Amino acid sequence: MSEGSGGSAAGTDMRTGAGAAPAGRPRRARLDALSAIRHGDLIGSILLTIAVMAVIVVAFGGNPWTVARTIVNNSLAEEIFLGQTIMTAAILVLTGLAAAIPFTARLWNIGGEGQMFAGAVVSVTLGIMLPEGTPHGLFVLILIIGAAAAGSVWGCVPGLLKAYFGINEIVTSLMLNFLAFFAANYVVTVAWPEIYAQLQSQEIHDNARFPDFWASAKVDVSVFIALAAALAAWLLITRTSLGFSIRSIGANPRAARLAGVRTRLVTVSSFAAAGAAGGLAGAVTVGGVHHDLALDLWISNYGYVGIAVALLARLNPMAVLPAAFIFSTLRVGSNSLQAAAGISASFGEVLIATFVITLMVTGAIKFRYAQN
Amino acid sequence: MTEVVIVTLFASGLALMVPVLLAALGEAISEQAGVLNVGIEGTMLFGAAICALVGVNVDSVALAVLAGVATGAASGVVLSALYVRRGTDQIVTGLLFNIFALGLTGILVSQVIIGNTAPTLSPWTVPLLGRIPKLRDVINEQNFLFWVSILLAIVIFYLLRRTWWGLYVRAAGERPHASSSAGLDVWRLRYGAVIAGNALAGLGGAALVVGTSGRFIPGFTSGRGFIALGVVVVARWNPLAVVAIAGLFGLSQALQFVAGLVSFFEPVPDQFWLALPYLVTVAAVAVSRGSRYPAAVGIPWREPASEAR
C-alpha cells in the first residue's frame, strides 16, 4: 500500500492520476458511472456508501433515517451501549492488527478469525483448568500470555508454509480458521460444556476475569491490551529493523530480497506477530467480554471485519484504533436495528463491507504492485 | 457391513462434491484469466440464498437453480467491474465481498426466507450406467446436477485447453501486456472469465440448496468457496483434475456420515470429522508445492496506453 503512484509500479496502480494520461493517445471510454467522483476520495466514498445503504434499506422496507439514528443512538448514546462499543472496538483493534502487520509485507493473513479462536480456546482452557486460587493479577497475565502464544503458533503455520514451501498463505490461513473453529467446538461441546446452555463452555474462574476499569459500562482492562498492542505494532513497523524489512518487502519483494532482507524470517515473524494480536483478541472475548467461550463468536466475524479495519486504517497500526472504533459503532448500533427499524443486525456487516469497497473504488485505499 | 460403509461413503461423497466442483471450475476459469476471485464464497452464498428464495416462492427446482446461476452471473458483473474495470485489489475486494454477502444473505434469511424450505432435487436414475451392479447403488443416488457438473468439467476442459478462446484466456492470465500487444482484448477476456466463473459458483451455491434440505441458513456455504480456492491449486487449473480433487474433498467430508458405522473410529470426536475436509485441503495444498499460479493472477490489468511509460 502506498500513497501516490511511484514510477516503479510497472504493471499497475489504481487510476488515480487521470490527468496524467499521455497527451494525444485516446483514453478508453469509461463505462462506469463512478468515475465522476474518482477524486472525491473519502467524501465520495462516504456519499456513495450512504447512497448504496439507503437503497438496501429501502429495498428491505426500512427508513434510512431511522436506521442511521438507531445505529448512532444504540452505540454511543447510552453508557451501556458505549461500553459495548468500546469492548467490541478492543477486539476489532486486535484482529485489525492481525491483518495490518502482514498486509504491510503484502502477506495475506486471512486467518485472524482462526488466530482469535486459538487464543480463545487456550484462554478458556487455562481459565477453567488452573486452580481457582491463583492470584488474580497472575491469572489474568497467564491468560493473556497463553492466548497470545497460542495465536502466534496458529499464525505461524501459514507463515512457515509460505516461507519454506512457497505455499499460498490465503488458502492455508483461511482453512486454519475452520480448524480452530472445530477445536473450539470440541472445547465447548465435549471438554467443558455448559450444562444450562447449548454451544457454550463453562465460565472461567472469577480470578481469571479481566478486572473492570469502568464497571457501570462493563469496560475492563481489555482496552489497555488493545492500546498497548497497537502501540507495540506501531513501534514494530516504524521503529525496528524487522519493521523496516516488513515494509521493504511490501514495497518491492524482489528489491528487498536482493538487498539482503531475510524474506523467510520476516514472513514467519510477521505472521507470528499477527497471530499474537489475533490470540489476544481471543483472550479479550473470553477473559473480558463473555467469561466463557460461545460458538456465537464465529458469526461475529471479528477476524474478517478486522481486515476491513486494517484497510480503513491504511495498514497504519495507530490508525487501526479509530478505524476499529468506527466499525464497532456500526456493528454495535446495528444490533438494535431489528427492534427499531425492522432490519436484521447483519446490516452492520453490509455497511462495513460496502464502505471499504467504495473506499477502494474511489481510490481512497490504494495498493501498488511491483511486477514480479 | 463393509459394503454398506463403502456405498454410503461414495454416494454421499459424490453428492457433497458437486457444489465444490462447480465453484472450483468457476475459480479455475477466472484464475486462468488472471483474476483471483476470493469473492467466490460470497458468490456461492448469494447463489444459494437467491435459489432458496425463489424456490420457496415459486416451488420450481429448475427456476430456483436458474435464479442461482443468474445471481452468480450478476455477482460476476459487480466483481468484474471492481476487479477488472476499477482494478481494485482482488484479494481484498473478494474478502470484503464475502463479508457483504454474509451480511446481506443474513438479512435475507431473517426478513424474507425465514425458516421456509425450497424444493429439492431427487436422485436421478441413470439410463445405462444405472444398471451396473454395485456402481448402481452409488450413482443412482446422485441428482441431475451431479451429471451437469461432470459434463461442465469436460466442456470447460475442452474450452480452456483446446480452443482459441481458452488459449487467449490463459494468455491474458499469464502475460496480459503481451496479449494486448498481440491484439487481444484483455478487458473482454477477463470480464467474460470472471462472469462465467461466478455464474458457475452461483450454480454451486444453488446445487448446495437443492441437493440438501432446501433450507438456507446464514453462512450456509461454510467455507466451500474457500476450499474451491485450494482445490484449483492442487488440480493445477486443469478442469478434469478439479473433478478428482473435489471428489477427494467430498469423500473426506462424507467420512463424518460413515464414521459412526465403523467401530474402529469410535474414540474419535465428531469435531475431527467435521474439520477433516479443511485439514485435507491444507494438506493437499501443502503437498502440491510445485503448483504455480498463472503469472498475472492478482495483478489488476491496466491498458498500456493509459500508463505513463
Image (cartoon, rainbow, N blue to C red):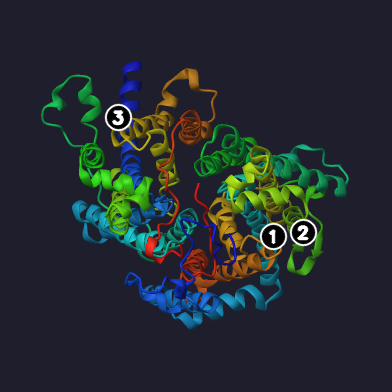
Q: CA distance from mark 1 to mark 2?
A: 7 Å
In which quarter of the view is residue A211 placed?
bottom right
Percent from the top left, x then y, of residue B89? 48, 58
Q: Nearer the viewer, mark 1 or mark 3?
A: 1
In which quarter of the view is residue B85 placed?
bottom left
Percent from the top left, x then y, of residue B279? 50, 33
Percent from the top left, x then y, of residue A14? 47, 64
Q: Secondary structure at mark 2?
A: helix
Residue hosting label 1: A317
* Label 1 or label 2, whichever comes before in sequence order: 2
Q: Amino acid at mark 1?
A: Pro
Q: Nearer the viewer, residue A190 or A82?
A: A82
Q: Secondary structure at mark 1?
A: loop
Residue hosting label 2: A231
Residue hosting label 3: B11
Q: Nearer the viewer, mark 3 or mark 2?
A: 2
Is disc 3 in the same subunit as disc 2? Answer: no
Name the side, left or right, on which A353 lies relative to A189: left
Percent from the top left, x then y, of residue A310? 61, 60
Taking the spot 24% from the left edge, 35% from the top edge, the residue there is B142
Taking the spot 38% from the left edge, 29% from the top edge, the residue there is B248
Q: CA distance from mark 1 to mark 3?
A: 50 Å
- The reply to whether the C-beta atoms of the residues labelled 1 and 2 are less than 8 Å apart is yes
Q: Amino acid at mark 3?
A: Ala
